[in-house]
Image (tube, rainbow, N blue to C red):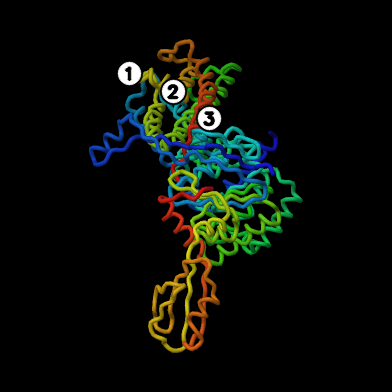
Amino acid sequence: MTALIEARGVSKRFRQHKRFPGLLGAFKTLVTSEYTEVTAVSDISFDIAAGEAVGYLGPNGAGKSTMIKMMTGILVPSAGTLSVLGRTPHEQRMANARQIGVVFGQRSQLWWDLPVIDSFTLHQRIYDIPQARYADNLKRFSALLDLTPFLDRAVRQLSLGQRMRAEIVMSLLHDPKILFLDEPTIGLDVVAKDAVRKFLAEINRERGVTIILTTHDLQDIETICPRLIMVDHSRLIFDGELGRLRAALGSARRLTLEFSADPGPMALDSATLTADEGLRKHYLLEREDVSLVQILGEVGSDRGLKDVALHEPDIEEVIRTFYQRRNAAPVAP
Amino acid sequence: MRNRLAILPLLIRMHVKSQMEYRGAFWLDRLAQIISYGAVLLILWILLQKFHQLGGWNWPELALLFSFQLLAYSLGASMSFTQLRELEELVRLGAIDTLLTKPVNTWAYLIFSGLNIGYVGHIILAIPVLVWALLAAQVEWSVGTALFFIFSLLSATMVTGALMTMIGATALIWVRSNHLFSIFFGFWELTRYPLGIFPTGLQVVMLTIVPLGYISSVPVAVLLGKPVPLLGDLAAPVTLLAGPCLVFIAIIHWRYALNRYQGAGG
């Protein structure tokens, strides 16, 4: 399969006036000709194929947004080559723009004082969307994200969740091949987040729109993106499936045993006790090969065991473990 | 290309519709502007009652200078000032990024989506004063002077728009640009008066580095057949060429700034 996006050794360095501390330093900052170079993206390479959904993940300042801005043609890379749909984005920014959709979670593209539908109409004109296709897309997406009740309302009167749903629909009206989303669920409530995630997953699955998404919310990745690209301190530190990351780290499972009467202190060979609440005891299963049957056998049937719960490590735990262990031994991509 | 131009009227319509959401405030603001510029004109009139002449210019001639400057400025600024002043904020908050991902000319989108109809107040004041002054002042009308009047006004409008674009575009590189607008308006206030009353150094500046002489003093002096300091007989062609030349420089500067754009962070 040919790659829709090819990044080869892409770097982005920003030049900033050197800043000096203190009041005197502030004056020195004003007149200095010294520069410091800040590296936001450092030697990053990856391929993204048509129809993929990729989560681009990293802590604040890791260079996620900068990478999105380079792929959308806003910023010019300092080194390396970047190709999006066979073009160099910053050189052919307009041609690139016609085939991509972009959503910035913290920046609106809708006209604040006008009804949502007015922004959509302008979008149709800017992207030359034929009327039939526009009407069809609008109808379908509006139904999926329940936009119809507020299409005629001024954007300033919408809730953040409604606005974000409108932003996402607008970004898809011209049938882009790639959809870039920079923190699309930031600030949304649980219901709105869920609606947005399900919609994006469906768009990717049904329409084959390639999705590149940056986020801090790991549930976004879990729902939408089978593939994960992780960056830290401007460098790529993991590229692969979430499942593979989980397996590579072998994060521990958590076990909770609930009893009808307190059986007293209870140590197990196959699990480590982490908290004892009397009737409820919590364990950590660090070994992969330990099964639930094995544990139940060890507890025995005469202790008044009422309920058992086994928790797979959630994505937050996996990622946290990953960042904690990273300095010791990097996981090979 | 035709399609691309076709979105411009739609952008203007949407912007006007947005502004009309606050209709009351809009008209109150226009009234305030007419009063404030009217006061400037009144002061000029009071001065002339006392001194009769300013640098060899009488009351109708100065009224012509005032109204020509106000009209050229409001036409040029409606297509540039508020939009480019706000560019600094768009850069600082990163909103310019959303514009850069659209398949449209960024400058055209910015200008037409923010076309400042607020300048209607300036125009309402400038046109009657201009018409009266053109009739009252000693202008020797011919086809040539009529054409010169129209094209020099057009050139003056272009000078305003080009300078504002160049100033605003610096925000793409340095994030901040509004201090440069303050310098612009410092010199702009001087363009209500004949160039000849200023020291030579200042005249040189206003014809070269900050070429605001071409938005009023030079074209109006040519129209009235008055001597133009430093330029002499070249004044007419230079003032007609100033607009197109500065627009050309502004386009190059805008493109340069857009390529140097680094974003404000994130």
- Circle on res. B211: 2
Q: Is residue A130 left or right of residue B148?
A: right
Q: Nearer the viewer, residue A106 or B76?
A: A106
Is there any visible trace of residue A314 in the rendered image? Answer: yes
Badge 1: chain ID: B
Q: Amino acid at mark 1?
A: Pro
Query: Given this view, does label 3 or label 1 mark the residue nearer the observer?
Result: 3
Q: Chain of mark 3?
A: B
In the image, are marks 3 and 1 on the same chain?
A: yes
Q: CA distance from mark 2 to mark 3?
A: 21 Å
Local secondary structure at mark 3: helix
Residue farthest along the right direction in this orientation: A132
Q: Quadrant of the N terminus of chain A?
A: top right
Q: On the image, numbered disc 1 is attached to which residue?
A: B199
Mark 3 highlights which residue?
B255
Around disc 3, counting alpha carbons within 10 Å, would you say few (fewer than 14), some (14 to 19), or many (20 or more)?
few
Q: CA distance from mark 3 to mark 1?
A: 36 Å
- SS under mark 2: loop
**Mark with earlier residue (2, 1):** 1
Which of pointers 3 and 1 lies earlier in the amino acid sequence? 1
Question: Vertical placement of B19 versus A243: above or below?
Answer: above
B184 to A104, vertically: above or below: above
Nearer-N-terminus badge (2/3)? 2
Location of residue B244 in the rendering, given as x and y in whole percent from the top left corner: 55, 22
Q: Position of residue A105 (x, y in %)?
A: 52, 53
- Of marks 2 and 3, the one in the foreground: 3
Q: Nearer the viewer, mark 2 or mark 1?
A: 2
Amino acid at circle 3: Arg
In this view of the protein, which residue sits in the foreground, A127 or B168?
A127
